[in-house]
Image: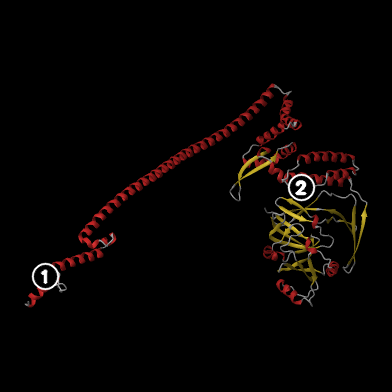
Amino acid sequence: MQNRVKLFFEEMSVKSDYEILDYGKNKNEMEEIAKKRGLKIPSKDIAMFKCKYAMVNQTNLNGCVLPKEEVEKSLETLNLKAIDKDHLRQSAVGMWLDSKLVGDDIVAYGGFWKSNFPEEYEEIKNRMKEGKMKISFEAWGDREFNKDGSYNLKNIEFAGGALLFDTEPAFPNAEVMTFSNRTLEFAKVIEDTKLIKGCGDIASPAVSLKLIKKITEETYSTVEIPNDKGYDVEFKRHTKKISYFSDGSESVEESDSISTDRYTSAQIEDIINEEIDVFFSSIIEGEDLVDETMSIEKMEVLMNDMSDEVAKKKMMVKIDELKKKKEQCKKLDYKERQSLSDNDFAIVANVENKKTGKPRKIRMFPIKDPVNIANALVRLPQAIETLKKLDISIDTVKNKILKKARELNMTDLLKSHEEEANTLMDELLKKYSKASIEEMAKFLDVELETIKASIVTKDQELAAKVQEITTKDTELATLKTEKETILKTIEESKLIVENSKIELEKVKAELAVFQAERDKKLNEEKAVFIKSRKDEIGEYAKDMSDEDILNELKFENAKLKKERDEAVKKASEHKGLDAGAVIITEDSTTKTRKVVQEKAWQTK
């Protein structure tokens, strides 16, 4: 979860080192900064100072962490931003000249306009020497929350900083006020002044106010509105007496005093009217300012000081009305809204997110309890344009709210709305109770024409809705037919796949039978073949295995041995050779060769 925020890092005041730079001692450092910014130093008008802030990757008292990588990317955004006095934008006293990251320390260089503010400059020097100087940086960023409740500040942009003269840092009690999608964290009470010119004096009633600053994202400008502290009836008066001399010089005498002046009736009336306007404008704009306006008790105290009784009674009526509206406009916090069901809202609609294109749900006007219902009825007219965009009838929404009111037995509220509904008819009856028949007939004719026109419009709207529904029905029927076709195709595809599987199993079975029969036949043929070879070579096969018999070379060897032995035996039988005689045998090829040679050479 992320929020764009502006932070005042006043905790720097207790975790930083500050020093005024001296040209004799810090010459190189100052010249480096001056070269970057095109400054001529030393200068009679500008005093350079340096601060070192050790808070990178640490959690401050507000749970904020400045990640080092984010600081590295953003430090240049501080350059040339204003140095204010006590965060008062109109009181700039210098500017930030440069900044860098040294290890885990932020080092920033500022330029103070010492010739413009000589007294403040002396005070700054003394405070820095004593280690009592307070400096605060301002920075924009996105909050990325951690599980422990702390958060990292991302996409940082430094907005400037301030020298704190009159304000003590108060981070342990810092307040967070949220407006729209932006937040300003601050922790101090500052003084707002109003100048009253007259008779050469300038009187400044210094009224202590907490400032609610509504941030404008594009320009970072502020709108300041007083909160529940209100206006003091008794206040300090700061007076400046200015004397002008002929040589163009001037002198200023300043003094403080406690004024016993009180507001006039007209002033009090203006103050209360201003607060009431702030309250109601906050409702219209949807801002959570209702609890930040002046308390009703404070208004009543002011009202009692009014001397004009007529004006006081007018204020009493307004304050009573404000009490009612304030109760009606009680708002639910985020968790309470999230816990409600859709039935507990007057408006529930699904729309398309313009950024992502994804659907999102809109829920408006909680109606869970009587306070919510009263609030919903008060604010419903403000939502007319939104309802038009959502194509929702305001009457439909109003009827839903009133239905819920009936369920909760809110008789007073229902009675008031019934009276409103009957007001128009009562006025018409009153207007025409003494009218002539002709006037009444004319009036009724006009009303009938209006009703007819309304009926025609409704009929046209109904016809358009019927046509729209018919079109949708046709589209649905087409989609249904397409769906059935697709389902049928899928079913047929499943059957084809199943048949293919069965066919494959059948082929596998037939192949197994064929292989078995083939192997049997081959084995039988092999046995016959082996037997024929064994018969052919006779006893020469007794020491040979079936594999040897099938081996062509081994079989041929055995066969030749048999033929040789038979030839030797046969020769011995015909010639009666003695045992051991050498018998020369010739094969047919050799014998043929010899015959050819003899004939060729005529020899024998």
Q: Nearer the viewer, mark 2 or mark 1?
A: 1
Which residue has dot 1 on it?
A: 576
In front here: 512 or 355?
512
Mark 2 falls on what kind of element? loop
Name the residue at 65% across, 28% down. 447
Drawn side of residue 304 relative to residue 278, left or right: right
* C-alpha gap between disc 2 and disc 1: 145 Å
Drawn side of residue 571 relative to residue 370, left or right: left
In front here: 149 or 27?
149
Which residue has dot 2 on it?
A: 289
In front here: 69 or 238?
69
For disc 1, the neighbor class at 10 Å (few under 14, some 14 to 19, many from 20) is few
Q: Quadrant of residue 251?
A: bottom right
Mark 1 falls on what kind of element? loop
For badge 2, the amino acid type reads Leu
User: Where is residue 596 shown, x and y percent of the image?
Assistant: 10, 73
Drawn side of residue 453 relative to residue 552, left or right: right
Q: How is the image coloured?
A: secondary structure
Q: Earlier in the sequence, mark 2 or mark 1?
A: 2
Name the residue at 21% across, 61% down. 537
Drawn side of residue 529 relative to residue 369, left or right: left
For disc 2, the neighbor class at 10 Å (few under 14, some 14 to 19, many from 20) is many
